Image: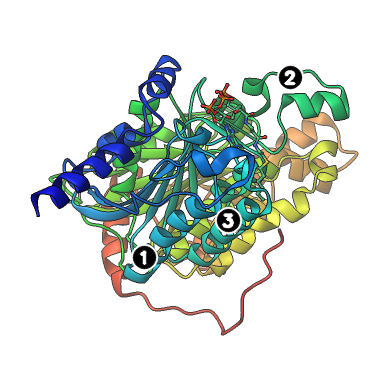
């Protein structure tokens, strides 16, 4: 008996050693943690239960029969974060560069299947050289098995990808199909083809970092949601983020007790909107004053910053926040902002997270580039997402709500449940000056000024919309948190279903 126990420990130690001390040292020298060290930080202490630690690859070509390392380059299992169950896989770069073999893929698929059965999120820590080159098509098949599960799990359990090393080739498509991607600065990259192939095909010279580093993907491409300083920060922020998410699409939002009074009055909000309609202000201030303890987890802060998306809590329960940001592009909706917010709204709707929308939008961004790159179809994504969402939707118009963008931003007409406006709200087809210049084309500048004043007096307020019932109530800015909290508690039992369909056809 004792011998068997010793043998078990020997096997466990062999698996835990990964690719050996030299490769572990090389991993540390790059400023990266090992697969197991990462899980130690991500999960609650002593909560990790590893599965499949003795799994080995089944390849025989290229001398692979003689090089088998237990675990086969990925550590898989489950644990808890703040006491809630989560399934995890963590690729071990010290074993065959974390590359994905058939068996490696089977391990990932096993924990994904279990997560689906029990209704728990999956977090993948990606650090891999891609398909295991020695295995050829078996490895490609392995990727596709993972992809298929990503798709079936989408909208059922939250899926989070941390990119903590290389992620190249088709391997980027599994993270791309998960809900959120966090990257580590100067240490992780994602691209379909690397700099060498790019040089050969297009003659462009680019570094890995420029092509697919954390800054590139969280600013330009919008592929990733956050760029974190190092492994430790990425893992700790993921823990904070996880606390906002439901376990699955039936569990409802998590609750964290809060001592912040729901009826907290914020007199500072009464002067947030500047006297001049063209002067910007920071919408983050409103969000911070409305959220429990001012706590807001923003996603994609550096991409399409003209719209703000992220999670907060009201009376302890998670809400999704979408807000135009007057500080950037005057808060206009453009292609990037529409795509960013649409995906966020759809995540919230899939997981029954109520959506609070703060509106100050002068319209869609005009321009040849916007039109040629498809603002019509891309803007429609956000319109579609809001219109199909059945979760509680509360909207507060702080200032401008012009044109089509008024309709899009969770208006009453798109089944907004409670649509409020501040007294500074301006709900109109367009800004007064633009409107007058069209209606009174050819009039003298003095007449235009005169008519603009008239138009402003008539339409630059929330009461025309309120008189039609499109705005449910014009509220004091200082009472915004109280109104939203009251609304959300009223809407807790909301029941609304869309007509049966196989699935919709959102303008992709
Ligand atoms: C097998 C691999 C591997 C791979 C790395 N290794 N990638 N083994 N298959 N794909 C091994 C190396 O042989 C080495 O083994 C160890 O991992 C560390 O690799 P190094 O090259 O020494 O590390 P580094 O210098 O940090 O470079 C990392 C790297 C590079 C940039 C990831 O290894 C690389 O370019 N790998 C190949 C990437 C690639 O082309 N993958 C296929 C993409 S196509 P030893 O024993 O020396 O420690 C693809 C298709 C998916 O993924 C399709 C899905 C639809």
User: Does residue 163 sit above or below 371 in this rendering?
Assistant: above
| Residue 452 horizontal side relative to residue 309, left or right | right
Instruction: Please name the residue that numbered disc 1 is placed on.
Output: 114
**Label 1 Cα crowd, 10 Å radius (few <14 / some 14-19 / many 20+):** some
| Residue 220 horizontal side relative to residue 313, left or right | right
Instruction: Please name the residue that numbered disc 3 is placed on.
Output: 142
Kindly state the secondary structure of the residue where label 3 is placed. helix
Kindly state the secondary structure of the residue where label 1 is placed. helix
Count of residue discs: 3
Marks 1 and 3, Cα distance to the nearest angstrom? 17 Å
Q: Nearer the viewer, residue 421 or 391?
A: 391
The numbered dot on residue 206 is 2
Residue furthest left as drawn: 2
Kindly state the secondary structure of the residue where label 2 is placed. loop
Marks 1 and 2, Cα distance to the nearest angstrom? 41 Å
- Ligand 1 is found in the corner quadrant, namely top right
């Amino acid at each position: 008996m004792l011998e068997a126990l010793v043998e078990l420990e020997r096997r466990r130690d062999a698996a835990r050693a990964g690719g050996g001390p030299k490769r572990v040292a090389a991993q540390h020298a790059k400023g990266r943690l090992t697969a197991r060290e990462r899980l130690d930080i991500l999960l609650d202490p002593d909560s990790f239960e590893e599965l499949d630690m003795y799994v080995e690859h089944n390849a025989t070509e290229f001398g692979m029969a003689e090089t088998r390392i237990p675990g086969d380059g990925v550590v898989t299992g489950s644990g808890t974060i703040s006491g809630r169950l989560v399934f995890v896989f963590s690729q071990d770069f010290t074993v065959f560069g974390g590359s994905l073999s058939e068996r490696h893929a089977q391990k990932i698929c096993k924990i994904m299947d279990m997560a689906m059965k029990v209704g728990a999120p999956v977090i993948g820590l990606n650090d891999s050289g891609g398909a295991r080159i020695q295995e050829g098509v078996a490895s490609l098949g392995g990727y596709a098995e993972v992809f298929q599960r990503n798709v079936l799990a989408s909208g059922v359990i939250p899926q989070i990808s941390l990119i903590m090393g290389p992620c190249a080739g088709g391997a980027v498509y599994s993270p791309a199909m998960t809900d959120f991607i966090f990257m580590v600065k100067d240490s992780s990259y994602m691209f379909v083809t690397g700099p060498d192939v790019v040089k050969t095909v297009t003659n462009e010279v680019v570094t890995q970092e420029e092509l697919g580093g954390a800054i590139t993907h969280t600013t330009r491409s919008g592929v990733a949601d956050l760029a974190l300083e190092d492994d430790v920060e990425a893992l700790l922020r993921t823990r904070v983020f996880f606390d906002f998410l439901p376990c699955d699409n039936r569990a409802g939002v998590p609750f964290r007790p809060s001592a912040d009074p729901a009826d907290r009055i914020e007199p500072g909000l009464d002067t947030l909107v500047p006297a001049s309609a063209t002067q910007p202000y920071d919408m983050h201030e409103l969000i911070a004053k409305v959220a429990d303890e001012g706590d807001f987890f923003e996603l994609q802060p550096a991409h399409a910053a003209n719209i703000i998306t992220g999670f907060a809590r009201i009376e302890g329960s998670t809400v999704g926040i979408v807000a135009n940001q007057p500080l950037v592009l005057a808060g206009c909706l453009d292609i990037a902002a529409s795509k960013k917010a649409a995906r966020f709204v759809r995540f919230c709707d899939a997981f029954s997270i109520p959506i609070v929308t703060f509106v100050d939008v002068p319209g869609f961004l005009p321009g040849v580039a916007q039109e040629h790159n498809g603002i019509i179809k891309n803007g429609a994504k956000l319109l579609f997402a809001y219109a199909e969402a059945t979760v509680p939707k509360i909207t507060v118009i702080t200032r401008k709500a012009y044109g089509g963008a008024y309709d899009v931003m969770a208006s009453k007409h798109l089944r907004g449940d409670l649509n409020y406006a501040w007294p500074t709200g301006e709900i109109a087809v367009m800004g007064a000056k633009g409107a007058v210049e069209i209606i009174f084309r050819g009039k003298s500048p003095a007449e235009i000024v005169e008519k603009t004043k008239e138009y402003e007096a008539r339409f630059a307020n929330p009461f025309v919309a309120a008189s039609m019932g499109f705005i449910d109530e014009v509220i004091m800015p200082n009472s915004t948190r109280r109104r939203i909290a009251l609304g959300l508690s009223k809407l807790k039992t909301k029941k609304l279903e869309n007509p049966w369909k196989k699935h919709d056809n959102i303008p992709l």
